[in-house]
Amino acid sequence: MCYHTSVKLKANDFIKVVNAPFPRQEKYLEFNHANGFAHPNLAVLSTDYGRSINLYNWGLIPFWAKDWNAAVKLRNQTLNARSEEVFSKPSFRDSILKRRCVIPVTGFFEWKHVGKEKIPYYIHPKEHPVFYLAGIYSHWNDPSTKDEITTFSILTSAANEMMSDIHNSAKRMPLMLDRENIDDWILPDLSPASIKELMNPCDDNNMEAYTISKDISNPKVNSDVESITDKIEYGN
């Protein structure tokens, strides 16, 4: 799955990688480690207000959630959306047809099971500045405050060869788009057949990975630090 990412880009660099305006860039935060379960606001490309970069909260709240308690429960279950099920799951089927977005990240984290040990890896693009993750989003109106909250989910796919070896427990990976396909993905009137044509696992030739500190797994340690992506070797 994909619950942990890094977005180590300045706002101006973010604008360059997607070639879009960023109206709320003063509220943008970089992340060495963005933990999905903390529900951070990440910068995403969408057509919500014209083609632009917007800040959405990670963990999709479907429009039909009845109250905040229901929303909180749902968003912990919707950090990811399986691409094979996204057209049929009640939480996702409206968004996949009407509200798709792209989440550019500089890398993501995953764990390999080796016996009883879990070894953390950092996976990043080999030649390009970012991975373009395929996402969906939703607008939800909190009935108690009347506030509108926009949230997103990252789509996942079956793992490629590299990720099957690293994420060897579930064999999943985030669904990544080629740079030339990101504008097709966010077209609001794209047909279901055309959407499915874009749902292909990333070639592992475009990815690199290495082991990092187990501090990323320790809730008592601040892992949103630059050194979290430093390479750490483990013995065999």
Image (spheres, grey):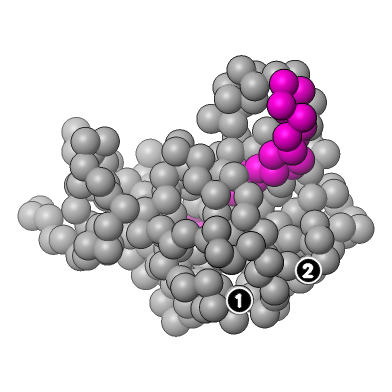
| 199 up-or-down from 132: above or below | above
Magenta: main secondary structure equals strand
Q: Is residue 150 magenta?
A: yes
Say which element carries label 1.
helix
Evaluate whether residue 4 shows in this view.
yes
Residue 168: x %, y % from top left: 37, 45
Of callouts 1 and 2, the N-terminal one: 1
What residue sits 26% from the left and 36% below the top?
A: 219
Looking at the image, which is closer to me, 181 or 36?
Answer: 36
Residue 30: x %, y % from top left: 44, 62
User: Extreme left residue here?
Assistant: 235
Looking at the image, which is closer to me, 233 or 41?
Answer: 41
Residue 76: x %, y % from top left: 53, 30
Q: Is residue 29 left or right of residue 223?
A: right
Q: Residues within 10 Å of mark 2 (few under 14, many from 20)?
A: some
What residue sits 72% from the left and 21% below the top?
A: 144
Residue annotated with mark 2 = 51
Q: Which residues are magenta?
A: 138-162
| 64 up-or-down from 163: above or below | above
Q: Is residue 152 left or right of residue 99?
A: left
Evaluate whether residue 164 shows in this view.
no
Say which element carries label 2.
loop
| Residue type highlighted by circle 2 | Arg
Q: Which mark is residue 15?
A: 1
What residue sits 66% from the left and 52% below the top?
A: 135
